[in-house]
Amino acid sequence: MDLFEQVEWANWKNLKDPEKESLLHQLLMYFVPPTVEVNTIQLVNFELYGIKCRTFELEFDGELFVFIPGNSEAILGWDLGAEGLRSHELLGFDVESLEKNTFKTSLTNDAILPASEWVEEETNYDLHSLEGIADYINDHTTDLRKVAIPAMFVQKYALPAGTEFLGIFDTITGTFEGEVERFFPYEKSICQKLFPKLTAQESLTWSFPQSLLVKNEFYLEFLPESDYYFVYSHSDFTHEELKLATKRQGFDLLSEDQWEYAVGGGTRRLFRWGNELLIQNNESGRQIKSKMDGANMFGLVIDTQQNHFELTDDLAKSKLIKQLVAKDTLIEKMLPLSSYFYSSHKISMEEKLNPQDYLYRKVIKIES
């Protein structure tokens, strides 16, 4: 087998650790630019919904990346409607109601109208029936397809668009931990904005902002339920400018196909963590939330807050969603977290990417 065959998922998972380590060194030598600093390499086990992957987590220029094996015949997209999902959750039945009601637990492809026959507007979907929910799901997910996905080094955490991570600012002590030299030019301005001079009356209602942006200088995001801000440098980029800046660093953005594979592992499930959609305030709900917010089968962490889009290399194809209006039904609330969710959101060529709206994730692709 040549190098590209060995880093195929079907072959990679059968390799012993020394063989994986030897392959990694070849990949770093041939595909990672010499300008990129590589350190903190370790073999790590990831697992989600029974899918296990032993792969590498490593740092490129101080940022965490994971190695994702390729798949020359990855099946992506969705055309199975509500199949596999829990009908009583979708239809709003509680567990005690199950014995009193009967309904389909799944739909076959034959039960779903082909896309060419859909004539109803989105607002006319009957989201209180499984048939209507199935139509809604199929219409809001990408087409079923088989594609070739290369092996990739993918950034573990997506960053706000146009930013680079500098470190963490503690609002209690006023101290910063991270790249001090790059933070220093912004320190005075940040402190003035986070610790303004207030009257006694103003201090009663003042609170730390959730985010703070000074274009082409810095961007801060508050960590929920903490006393800390993530601090980033900021450049006011269009989509094309971001791609070019990322390319100059030796990286690319994921394509839509590559994003779907990296997030969902090419599994035939609508959601990477399984079929559970209803998250209750109990132990079961906390376990589901832990799967959603934790690393996936390849070690990536995906935003679940629904307050950002995640960019691909195509400005017409964003993933995830920035949910501006609260949704009524469970499927509307949860479908944007599907690996195959299709967003109708479009980015114009001239639009400057607001880090409060967009995330991006860097990648090095193992391609000939």
Image (cartoon, rainbow, N blue to C red):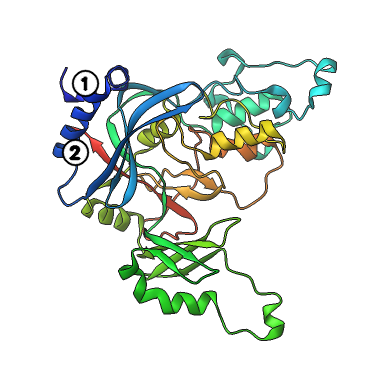
| Residue 189 % position (x, y) | 44, 78
Q: Position of residue 266 (x, y in %)?
A: 42, 25
Q: Residues within 10 Å of mark 1 (few under 14, many from 20)?
A: some
Q: Which residue is mark 1?
A: 5
Spatial CA distance of label 1 from label 2 is 17 Å
Q: Is 214 rendered above or below residue 283?
A: below
- Across and down, in percent, residue 348 comes to 41, 55
Quadrant in which the C terminus is drawn: top left
Locate residue 63 relative to residue 29 in the image: left or right.
Answer: right
Q: Pointer 2: residues within 10 angstroms few (<14), some, or many (20+)?
A: some
Compared with residue 355, is residue 60 higher up or lower down, i.e. above or below?
A: above
Which corner quadrant holds the N terminus? top left
Give percent across and percent down for residue 271. Answer: 54, 29
Which picture quadrant has residue 146?
top left
Name the residue beneath numbered marker 2: 28
Residue appearing at x 71%, y 42% in the figure: 328
Horizontal side of residue 173 vs 42, given as left or right: right
Q: Amino acid at mark 1?
A: Glu
The amino acid beneath tag 2 is Leu
Between marks 1 and 2 in the image, the one whose residue lies nearer the viewer:
2
- What kind of element bears circle 1? helix
Judge whether residue 121 can be spotted in this image: no
From what the image shows, is residue 351 above or below residue 99? below
Q: Residue at x 64, y 34 (%)?
A: 331
The label number, if any, that marks residue 281 in the structure image = none
Sequence-first disc among 1 and 2: 1
User: Is residue 1 among the parts visible in the rendering?
Assistant: yes
Q: Name the secondary structure under disc 2.
A: helix
Q: Residue furthest right?
A: 100
Q: Nearest the camera: 275 or 122?
A: 275
The reply to whether dot 1 and dot 2 touch (C-beta < 8 Å) is no
